[in-house]
Amino acid sequence: VQLVESGGGLVQPGGSLRLSCAAYDLIFSNYIMSWYRQSPGNEREWVATIRVAGTTEYAESVKGRFTISRDNAKNTVYLQMNSLKSEDTAVYSCKAVQMGRPVYWGQGTQVTVSS
């Protein structure tokens, strides 16, 4: 099993980025998918989750600015990030969870918000 994130980079405050997480060798549609982030000196922070049925949850810090979505045909989960702030700077990682199965993590993608 492999989760591969992409789409990170450098963006100015107020800008947007869309992250992708492609999953390999698992039945993607059966997994709850989440995004987490970690900045230097801080613990890993939960950002958003999308469940098998498509329902979503967000951390208060990103609610109204970030949107998580999934495309089961492409085995991919997305994180659309708008109105980015400097405090959104972090390594963003995706996680796949299914009851009774191991938890899988991607390697992460760097997002830097700076002028």
Image: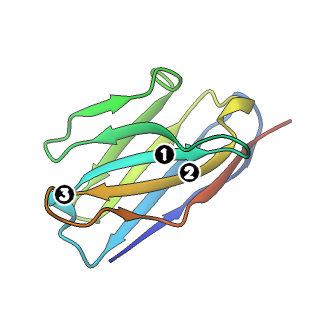
SS for dot 1: strand
The dot on residue 92 is: 2
How packed mark 1 is, by other alpha carbons closer than 10 Å (few <14, some 14-19, many 20 or more), is: some
Q: Is residue 113 left or right of residue 24?
A: right
Q: First in sequence: mark 2 or mark 1?
A: 1
SS for dot 2: strand
Tags 2 and 1 in contact by the CB under 8 Å rule?
A: yes
The residue located at (31%, 58%) in the rendering is: 96
Image spot of residue 12 (x, y percent)? 77, 36
The disc labelled 1 sits on which kind of residue? Tyr
Mark 3–mark 1 distance (CA, rounded to whole Å): 17 Å
Compared with 4, 80 (above or below) is above
Compared with 61, 54 (above or below) is below
Image spot of residue 26 (x, y percent)? 23, 73
Q: State the residue lying farthest toward the right.
A: 115
Compared with 67, 111 (above or below) is below
Image spot of residue 105 (x, y percent)? 42, 63
Give the residue number, with chain letter if any, for mark 3: 98
The disc labelled 2 sits on which kind of residue? Tyr
The residue located at (32%, 77%) in the rendering is: 1
Tags 3 and 2 in contact by the CB under 8 Å rule?
A: no
The residue located at (48%, 41%) in the rendering is: 80
* Figure quadrant of the C terminus: top right
The residue located at (36%, 54%) in the rendering is: 77
User: Closer to the camera, 32 or 17?
Assistant: 32
User: Closer to the camera, 65 or 42?
Assistant: 42
Among the 4 quarters of the image, the one containing residue 98: bottom left
Give the residue number, with chain letter if any, for mark 1: 36
The dot on residue 75 is: none
Compared with 36, 71 (above or below) is below
Q: First in sequence: mark 3 or mark 2?
A: 2
